């Protein structure tokens, strides 16, 4: 299931999809891809002599890369062999509500039980999977993996790399630090062991003259990654919801927790060594992090290139004008409370119950961060367009399911709820803030 061949990405426009996967299977449909996934206690070596006793899917960290084809059904038989309940959220995938893998939609899978997730991925792109039960501990211990959906017609590249970034808070022997404490509750859990695909500061390679597609996932609990490749220029071609309209040149890109980006790396010159860094980013935490290295990229001998990148990748029709009137206000705030010392609120309460959303009705939400720290806003099960950030349009149009909310900032988003009624949620994806109450639930109704 590891991906190493060229990817293919659909040039489709986003249209509301009735998600018939929830209905009875169509006998004429192609057979579903069937995958077995098991969560169990797993020891994983992050660097020579440093082994973490944690969890893994199929005994590995990250879990296996799950590959699906856009529009083709997939079936994942998930067995829980942990000593605690768990379930799987398919982050970014537009699945039926019953398959979203949250405790609002599903009873957690008890130890020894198996649950079968069935859905048809409607979008090509870079997604991921992780628990939505006791996630502050289960993700940190290693439960996460990449989920790649391939479309029919994508930019041709010489090679693809799937890179899952994470960090772990553990000592030099790999013993995980205890969970909780005031700073962790305030900042979210960050660690000094920085990982790409489960390994501490690995060395990656690229052939000179070639162009690679890097599918990057930030699977850390709380860390923001301001990604830089030693200052080299790369091209952004995709975000959470797949391809953007045209490649965008950049020397850095900010990945809040749970965010994804697809970039084109290369062509580079033989002999170059580039540092894969997270640059200093101030998200108003108690501990300030400067520039830190996640890995190294070495450029090897030249090879011929077959890369072919169109100047136009896709058309994304705008859902609404930048000055559209909001239909709803969502306010993230942080307050002190006697009970918890610190509360993380949505519209003034923890674990907010929001009013229902009606299928097919255009949603324009003003998502406000009234606090003095950054929060990554994540909407389950749907993509949105960012219309504005404090009244200014974003650099390019895209489909997103995570957007950063800088302090004292309002981000206006637009989305259309397709016909997938049920219980849905949005929340801050800093896991400790989510757990402390920075989340909202709503019913999608017909």
Image (tube, rainbow, N blue to C red):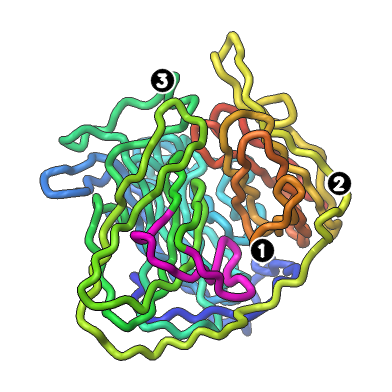
Q: Nearer the viewer, mark 3 or mark 1?
A: 3
Could you say which disc has been placed on residue 341 in the image? none
Q: Nearer the viewer, residue 73 or 385?
A: 385
How many neighbours does mark 2 have within 10 angstroms: few (below 14), some (14-19), or many (20 or more)?
few
How many neighbours does mark 3 have within 10 angstroms: few (below 14), some (14-19), or many (20 or more)?
few
Q: Earlier in the sequence, mark 2 or mark 1?
A: 1
Could you say which disc has been placed on residue 22 in the image? 1
How many marks on residues?
A: 3
Q: Residue 312 location in percent, x, y?
A: 62, 82
Helix, strand or loop status at disc 2? loop
Q: CA distance from mark 2 to mark 1?
A: 29 Å
In the image, farthest residue toward the left: 49
Residue at 77%, 44% (x, y): give it: 366
Residue at 78%, 59% (x, y): give it: 416
Residue at 42%, 55% (x, y): give it: 227
Q: Nearer the viewer, mark 2 or mark 1?
A: 2
Q: Residue 168 location in percent, x, y?
A: 32, 40
Magenta extent: 227-250
Q: Residue 141 location in percent, x, y?
A: 33, 41
Residue at 60%, 79% (x, y): give it: 313
Which quadrant of the view contains residue 420?
bottom right
Could you say which disc has been placed on residue 327 in the image? 2
How many neighbours does mark 1 have within 10 angstroms: few (below 14), some (14-19), or many (20 or more)?
some
Circles 2 and 1, Cβ within 8 Å, touching? The answer is no
Helix, strand or loop status at disc 3? loop
Judging by the rendered image, the residue that carries numbered circle 3 is 181
Magenta span includes 105: no
Q: Nearer the viewer, residue 237 or 430?
A: 237
């Amino acid at each position: 299931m590891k991906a190493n061949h060229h990817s293919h990405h659909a040039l489709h426009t986003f249209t509301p999809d009735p998600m018939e996967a929830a209905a009875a299977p169509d006998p004429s449909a192609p057979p579903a891809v069937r995958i077995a996934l098991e969560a169990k206690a797993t020891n994983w070596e992050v660097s020579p002599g440093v082994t973490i006793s944690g969890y893994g899917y199929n005994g590995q960290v990250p879990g296996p890369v799950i590959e699906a084809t856009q529009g083709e059904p997939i079936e994942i038989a998930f067995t829980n062999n942990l000593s605690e309940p768990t379930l799987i959220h398919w982050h970014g995938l537009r699945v039926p509500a019953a398959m979203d893998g949250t405790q609002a939609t599903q009873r957690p899978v008890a130890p020894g039980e198996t649950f079968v997730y069935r859905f048809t991925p409607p979008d090509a792109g870079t997604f991921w999977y992780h628990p939505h039960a006791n996630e502050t501990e289960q993700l940190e211990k290693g439960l996460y993996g990449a989920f790649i959906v391939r479309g029919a017609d994508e930019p041709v590249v010489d090679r693809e790399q799937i890179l899952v970034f994470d960090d772990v808070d553990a000592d030099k022997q790999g013993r995980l630090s205890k969970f909780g404490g005031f700073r962790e509750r305030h900042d979210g859990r960050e660690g000094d062991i920085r990982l790409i695909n489960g390994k501490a500061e690995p060395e990656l390679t690229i052939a000179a003259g070639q162009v690679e597609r890097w599918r990057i996932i930030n699977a850390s609990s709380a860390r923001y990654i301001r990604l830089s490749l030693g200052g080299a220029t790369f091209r952004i071609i995709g975000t959470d919801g797949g391809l953007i309209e045209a490649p965008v040149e950049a020397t850095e890109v900010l990945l809040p927790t749970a965010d994804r980006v697809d970039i084109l790396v290369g062509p580079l010159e033989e002999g170059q060594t580039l540092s894969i860094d997270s640059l200093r980013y101030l998200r108003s935490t108690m501990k300030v992090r400067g520039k830190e290295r996640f890995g190294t990229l070495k450029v090897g001998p030249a090879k011929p290139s077959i890369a072919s990148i169109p100047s136009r990748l896709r058309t994304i029709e705008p859902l609404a004008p930048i000055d559209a009137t909001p239909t709803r206000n969502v306010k993230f705030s942080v307050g002190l409370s006697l009970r918890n010392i610190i509360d993380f609120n949505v519209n003034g309460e923890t674990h907010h119950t929001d009013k229902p959303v009606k299928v097919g009705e255009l949603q324009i939400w003003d998502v406000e961060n009234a606090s003095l720290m950054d929060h990554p806003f994540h909407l389950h099960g749907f993509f949105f367009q960012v219309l504005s950030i404090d009244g200014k349009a974003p650099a390019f149009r895209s489909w997103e399911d995570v957007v950063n909310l800088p302090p004292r900032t309002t981000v206006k988003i637009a989305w259309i709820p397709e016909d997938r009624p049920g219980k849905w949620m949005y929340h801050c994806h800093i896991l400790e803030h989510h757990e402390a109450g920075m989340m909202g639930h709503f019913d999608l109704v017909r």
